[in-house]
Amino acid sequence: MTTLMRSVAELPLLDHHCHGVFGRDLDRAAFEANLTEAAAAHPGAGSLFDTQVGFAVRRFCAPVLDLAAHATPEDYLARRAELGHAEVTARFLGAARLGGLCVDTGFTPEALLPPAALGVAAHAPAYEIVRLEQVAEEVAATGVGAGDFANAVRERLAVRTRDAVGVKSIAAYRVGLGLAPDRPDDRTVREAAARFLATSPRRLADEVLHRFLVYCAVDLDLPVQFHCGYGDADVRLHECNPLLLTDLLRALQPAGVPVVLLHNYPYHREAGYLAQVFPHVYLDVSLATHNLGRRSVALLAEALELAPFAKLLYASDAYGLPELYHLGAVLFRHALSDLLSAGVAEDAWRPGDADRMAALVGADNAKRVYRLP
Ligand SMILES: [Zn+2]
């Protein structure tokens, strides 16, 4: 990794997809369980510090806690415990040097720091992204009947998104991305709602209802994020290729609402293709950026083979560990700087072009998509 281009080093990044962090101290098992997409450490199969992301923590996070780069996991975790979670969170969110955050508030198996507190720690404005399936599950919990379900969802979504900047679909986690293109009619939604409301627990996993929710958001003129590609063991990765959304993306194009494909790895090239051919489609390489560690340079370069520079957004997908806010940012800065400065060295573009592309990818694309000030 080379010295960062000045325009990339100084740029406040807009993190358009991230989550809360834990408000508690973590032992080694809990830290390792949240370092990768594995649900837990792998007892008897080695340490999850011996991964690309583990080495990136030791290389880039240790100095933020006043340790030498490449500190051992034992020294790193001891220093972390000594400083305490509040100080560790403040240091990493500050070190990320963000210009703003769009926080997905829909996944909270335990209480996490809310957007306002994340914004304070990051010294940047924090905005909310509302998870569509959560709104539908909240409506189901009110005891509504199948006939009133569609209207109740529309009304609740309008209220819940009043101060939000976008919504997110986790259809990938529940049914995969093979969604049909058309807006489902009232009768189809009512029949699907009856099936959903008869289940217990009410965990929405119905192709019609995921699609209905997307159209509800489009009717509210809200940018729609889709989880795509890489995720934890709950996804069936082969059903999360963003190309499966092709027909739906084509159907949504006339509405003009931005659709943002999140994560995408290992289908980031496919996502880049979709972003090239559809004017309303955007992508990021979040989550994979920190998990790939030093290989995130290749990841970003591959995503930007086809994707126009005006279509790629920065995101960390940090969740739980505040380290992931910093790692996402530092690895993305290195990847972007390497890509742009190599292009300058090869006379593929001029230094002024490189600075302009850095500003687009680092912040301006996200500001445009989510209409941020
Ligand atoms: Zn996420």
Image (cartoon, rainbow, N blue to C red):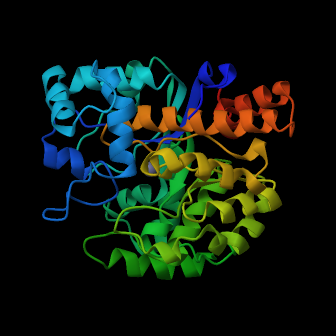
The quadrant of the image that shows the N terminus is top right
> Looking at the picture, how far across and down is residue 259, in whole percent?
67, 54
> Looking at the picture, how far across and down is residue 39, in whole percent?
25, 60
Residue at 21% across / 44% down in the picture?
31
- 343 to the left or right of 141: right
Q: Quadrant of residue 46?
A: bottom left
202 w.r.t. 287: above or below:
below
> Looking at the picture, how far across and down is residue 296, in whole percent?
54, 47
- 135 to the left or right of 73: right
Number of callouts: 0
The quadrant of the image that shows the C terminus is top right
Residue at 61% across / 18% down in the picture?
10
Front one among 168 and 334 = 334
Q: Quadrant of residue 74?
A: top left
54 w.r.t. 177: above or below:
above
Residue 289: tell me if it is visible: no
Residue at 34% across / 57% down in the picture?
37
98 w.r.t. 140: above or below:
above
- 37 to the left or right of 335: left
Residue 149: tell me if it is visible: yes
Front one among 170 and 283 = 283
Front one among 197 and 291 = 291
- 52 to the left or right of 165: left
> Looking at the picture, how far across and down is residue 315, in whole percent?
54, 41
